[in-house]
Each structure stands twice: as structure tokens, then as C-alpha cells.
């Protein structure tokens, strides 16, 4: 099984989000390769849009085998008087996966390990699978996390994807426990994705820029 995550980041209007999912569904319906990968448990797709688009996208998508909604983050607080926060409890009936600790949050919002640990605990408590994003082996790997996304910040969003050999070196340094899924994510596109798919040590890809367009995102899915 390969896990492919679409991380839209802070992009799109509602109309653009709806257009994306309509095109995505049309591609799924006509692309036998992607359909078969989903049906035969070779591919899991996780779509992580901005929060307000989770419900409309989920409704349009309906029940599709091995396609899930995710969030790009969640709150480190359980609930209560925390204006603006979106909690794991709020998200629990809407998503299956949540990204936690993305480098853009660590860098721009001073996200600390303390918060990240709380987010992971709350996600699990509310039945959401956390996908922990790490920049390198200095970031803490928490026990019980089943998905680790390695995202070297120097390779994010600039087309300079990291060589598979370096990605595998980092996987070794992360010393992941048996069964933990290892995902790579930085400047992945329809051209370079095959290098990662060929390597059985890499369980999936986290896609930012190339996920904004459903055609370029699906050009990755069809190569699984
Ligand atoms: P990118 O983003 O694909 O644009 O490099 C990846 C990410 O930050 O999740």
C-alpha cells in the first residue's frame, strides 16, 4: 500500500476547491489504473484541504474505497474557551488523518514539541490517525505514531526534491519502530514520484504544490 497525501496548504476558494474535487472524481471514474490501485489496496489517498473545505469535499466525494479526508493541523487543546482553535473533537467525525508538526508550522507559528505531543495525543484520543511531519532526526518521534512524513525544509516547494538515497539515509537515522509507515514529502511531482515508488522502504508521498491541480496530483496517483 502506498499512501499519497494532498496538502493544499493555505490555498483555494470554495469554488476552486469544488472544481478540484469535481475534476478529481471525473479522473477517478475514467482512469482504470487509479481505480484498480484503490480497489486492490495498493493506494490510499488522503486529501488535506483548509478546514472549511473538508465538509463540502467530503460530501461531493461520498464513500470511495481508500480515499479519506485529512487536516493539515489540529489544536493542542481539548476544547473550551480558545477562540479560533479547531480541535480533534470537532474534527473527529470529519477526518481520518491529521498532519501534525509540519515544518511550516514549526517555523512560522513557533510550534513546539510540547504542542506537537499534545496534538498527537488528542488526535489519537478522538480516533484520528496523526501523521507526524519531521524535518530530520533532531525532531522527536513519539511512541505510537504510525505515520512519519520526512520533509526536508530545504527541498519543500522549490523543485529540488531530495534523492531517494538521501531519503533512505534519513529513514535509517530516524530509527523507526517496526510497522511505522515512512512517507517522503518535498517537491514531489508526476515526473520524480516513480523514483520513490520504486523503493519499497518508502510507503508514500506527501504532496504540496503538485496537489493543487487535480491533473498533476492524479499523474502521481497513476504511477503507483
Ligand atoms: P511541496 O510541499 O510538495 O510543495 O514541496 C510539500 C509539503 O510541504 O507538504
Image (tube, rainbow, N blue to C red):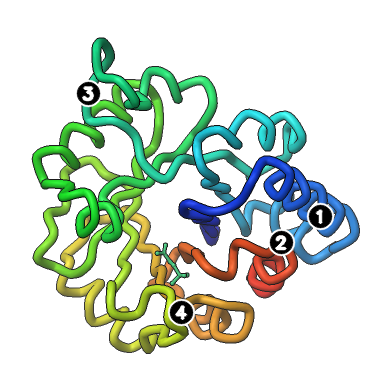
Quarter of the view holding residue 128: top left
| Front residue of this view, candidates 224 and 115 | 115
Distance in Å between CA atoms under marks 1 and 4:
30 Å
The answer to whether mark 1 and mark 2 are in CB contact below 8 A is yes
Disc on the earlier residue, 4 or 3: 3
Among the 4 quarters of the image, the one containing residue 170: bottom left
Q: In the rendered view, would you say 26 is above or below 193?
A: above
Q: Position of residue 69 (x, y in %)?
A: 56, 39
Vertical placement of 110 versus 62: above or below? below
Question: Taking the image as drawn, is residue 220 in sight?
Answer: yes
The answer for how far apart the CA atoms under marks 3 and 1 are is 36 Å
The answer for how far apart the CA atoms under marks 2 and 3 are is 33 Å
Is 69 rendered above or below residue 8?
Answer: above
For the image, the number of numbered tags is 4
Estimate the x, y position of residue 91 in percent, counting from the top left.
45, 25
Q: Nearer the viewer, mark 4 or mark 3?
A: 3
Q: Image point 73% across, 44% down: which residue? A: 15
Q: In the figure, 31 relative to 173: above or below?
A: above
What residue appears at the point 43 percent right and 74 percent down from the top-left corner?
157
Q: Which residue is mark 2?
A: 214
Q: Secondary structure at mark 4?
A: loop
Residue that appears at 73% across and 39% down: 64
Residue on which disc 1 sits? 23
State the image quarter where residue 218 is shown.
Answer: bottom right
Q: Please state, as top left, top right, bottom left or bottom right, where the N terminus lies in the image.
A: bottom right
Q: Are marks 4 and 2 in contact (CB under 8 Å)?
A: no
Q: CA distance from mark 4 to mark 2?
A: 25 Å
Label 4 CA crowd tier, 10 Å (few <14, some 14–19, many 20+): few
Location of mark 3 (residue): 77
Amino acid at each position: 500500500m502506498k499512501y499519497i497525501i494532498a496538502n493544499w496548504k493555505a490555498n483555494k476558494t470554495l469554488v476552486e476547491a469544488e472544481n478540484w474535487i469535481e475534476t478529481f472524481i471525473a479522473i477517478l471514474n475514467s482512469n482504470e489504473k487509479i481505480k484498480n490501485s484503490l480497489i486492490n489496496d495498493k493506494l490510499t489517498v488522503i486529501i488535506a484541504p483548509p478546514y472549511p473545505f473538508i465538509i463540502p469535499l467530503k460530501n461531493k466525494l461520498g464513500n470511495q474505497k481508500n480515499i479519506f479526508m485529512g487536516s493539515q493541523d489540529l489544536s493542542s487543546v481539548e476544547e473550551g474557551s480558545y477562540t479560533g482553535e479547531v480541535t480533534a473533537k470537532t474534527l473527529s467525525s470529519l477526518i481520518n488523518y491529521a498532519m501534525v508538526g509540519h515544518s511550516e508550522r514549526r517555523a512560522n507559528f513557533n510550534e513546539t514539541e510540547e504542542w506537537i505531543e499534545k496534538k498527537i495525543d488528542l488526535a489519537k484520543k478522538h480516533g484520528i490517525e496523526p501523521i507526524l511531519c519531521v524535518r530530520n532526526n533532531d525532531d522527536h518521534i513519539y511512541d505510537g505514531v504510525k505515520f512519519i512524513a520526512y520533509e526536508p525544509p530545504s527541498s519543500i516547494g522549490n523543485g529540488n526534491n531530495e534523492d531517494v538515497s538521501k531519503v533512505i539515509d534519513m529513514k535509517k537515522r530516524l530509527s523507526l519502530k517496526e510497522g511505522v509507515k515512512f512517507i517522503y514529502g518535498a517537491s514531489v511531482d508526476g515526473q520524480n514520484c516513480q523514483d520513490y515508488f520504486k523503493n519499497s522502504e518508502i510507503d508514500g508521498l506527501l504532496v504540496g504544490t503538485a496537489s493543487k491541480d487535480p491533473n498533476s496530483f492524479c499523474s502521481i496517483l497513476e504511477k503507483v
